[in-house]
Amino acid sequence: MSALLPILQATPWGKTLDAEEFAAAAADITERRVAAGGYVCRKGEPVESWIGVLDGLVKMSSISPEGKPISFTGVPTGGWFGEGSLLKYPEPRLYDVVAVRDSQVAYMPRATFMRLLDNSIAFNRFLLKQLNERLGQFIGTVENDRLLEPDARVARALAQLFNPLLYPGTATQLQLSQEEIGLLSGVSRQRANQALQVLERAGLLKVEYGGVRVLDIDGLKSFG
């Protein structure tokens, strides 16, 4: 827990709490390592935790009745998610969350989350902002999937990782493989590779060994 404390203190929600509130909340949080391809949480199970990505990358997804996989969004280092599901308790979780790469994940128990919700005005303000940002992100994702070509969908999926409230830990050098980018964008690895070449020629990013370096975030947001 001693190594976890400074990470939690640096989170947007951790900064909102006074020392007593933070200490009580941090004491309840557990963490575990989830290997690439492993489940962080599963669709249909009870929602018992608010979840944060301490290190790594996870993907919210589901599978249609016909067996078609559907990707909602990726959550990189620094992101916390599941507040909406907790607020709808006891409704079961409506999506799977799978580790795209080996990830260190934190779990805040539902009771702790609700205690903060009931007693901390600052935490409530943070959640309002987070929920508003999340709503905007998902509306944008639906719009992108329905209106944009694959090149633009890849651009927007990368740009989404730079939301400063939802994902404060994102650096301009993204350690993402082309397969991971494809998973986040809803396209194949080969199509993601083609899109990255187009975006590189446009001067928006640079493809590097083991990932990409983003050069123009606003350009990615408006591409296409």
Image (cartoon, helix red, strand yellow):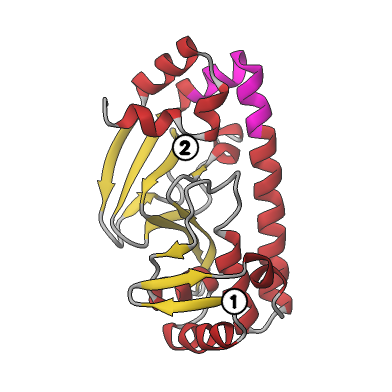
Residue 116 belongs to magenta span: yes
Q: Residue at x 44, y 79 (%)?
A: 207
Q: Nearer the viewer, residue 169 or 49?
A: 169
Crowdedness of circle 2 by 10 Å Cα count: few (<14), some, many (20+)?
Answer: many
> On the picture, is 32 further left or further right than 60?
left
- What is the x, y in percent for residue 85? 56, 40
Q: Residue at x 44, y 64 (%)?
A: 173
- Mark 1 neighbour density, 10 Å: few (under 14) some (14–19) many (20 or more): some
**In-image side of 10 versus 73 (left or right):** left
Q: What predominant SS class does the magenta segment belong to? A: helix
The residue tagged 1 is 204
Q: Quadrant of the C terminus?
A: bottom right
Sequence-earlier tag: 2 or 1: 2
* Real-space Cα separation, disc 2 to disc 1, in angstroms: 39 Å
Identify the magenta region: 113-127
Point out which mark residue 47 bears.
2
Amino acid beneath label 2: Val
